[in-house]
Amino acid sequence: MHTETLPFHAPAARRMVSVPPPRRATATVGDLFDVMGVPMQFARNEEVYGAGEPADYFYKVKSGCVRTYTVSADGRRQIGSFYLPGDVFGFEAGDIHSLSAEAIVSGTVQVVKRAALTARAAGDASVARLLLDLTCGELRRAQDHIGLLVRSAAERVAGFLLALAKREGSATEVVLPMSRQDIADYLGLTIETVSRTLTQLESTATIALPSARRVVLRNAAALRGLAA
């Protein structure tokens, strides 16, 4: 029987080529920052970025907690937001940071270059949607904060505890990574008012304070009634 040797370039003799699977769309912000981000360690009270600096990066809290804040001309500090593990921060309408950011406790932050993420979003609809969702989330956070600042001290503290419990995924207690002074500067109150309000809520069995950093929600319905 006649046999023919096929030349190397013939289809039957071509080398097997491994075809990569189609790229999976980014499902979560965690996926995106894990792939594109660089982890950076920050010590307690260490600055992540300062007001007036170029907003060249986006940040995701991997561990620890971060606060953003501004300082008025008379030296008063106003905290804009607290960021917990999984939260993304550093979004600005312009190219300059309007707030400063500090680590409240030692932790790790994933850092992604803004230009790289924006370029990725231009060619990937899932990333563009993710950035839009994150931006809208920041807007809602700011609106909720403004809504708290026009309420009574008890309503502010109750609303803060409920919101933090929801973010921590707990219906029964809150672990406070931030200090009483941080809470006061976030709610636009004095530290004395925050401490007095927490004591009043404890005296009515609405909450329990087993430690300075732990708040047990004994009567969540009463808290929701205050915050409504």
Image (cartoon, rainbow, N blue to C red):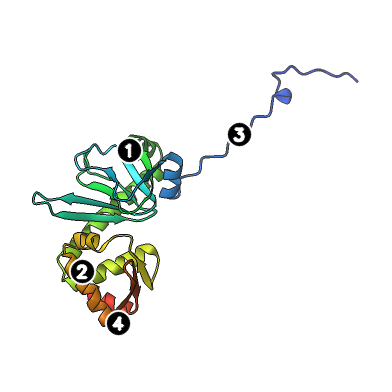
Asked if residue 168 shows in the view, the reply is yes
Residue at 39% over, 68% down: 170
Give the residue furthest to the right.
1
Q: Earlier in the sequence, mark 2 or mark 1?
A: 1
Question: Regarding mark 2 in the picture, which secondary structure is present there?
Answer: helix
Question: How far apart are labels 4 and 3 at the CA level?
Answer: 63 Å
Disc marking residue 19:
3
Question: How far apart are labels 1 and 3 at the CA level?
Answer: 31 Å
Q: Nearer the viewer, mark 4 or mark 1?
A: 4
Residue at 9% over, 49% down: 73
| Crowding near the residue tagged with mark 3, few <14, some 14–19, many ≥20 C-alpha atoms within 10 Å | few
Residue 22 sits in quarter: top right
| Crowding near the residue tagged with mark 2, few <14, some 14–19, many ≥20 C-alpha atoms within 10 Å | many
Disc marking residue 48:
none
**Amino acid at dot 1:** Arg
Question: Regarding mark 4 in the picture, which secondary structure is present there?
Answer: loop
The residue wearing badge 1 is 114
The residue wearing badge 2 is 194
Residue 190 sits in quarter: bottom left
Quadrant of the drawing holding the C terminus: bottom left
**Amino acid at dot 4:** Ala
The residue wearing badge 4 is 205
Q: Nearer the viewer, mark 2 or mark 1?
A: 2
Q: Is residue 12 left or right of residue 209?
A: right
**Amino acid at dot 3:** Val
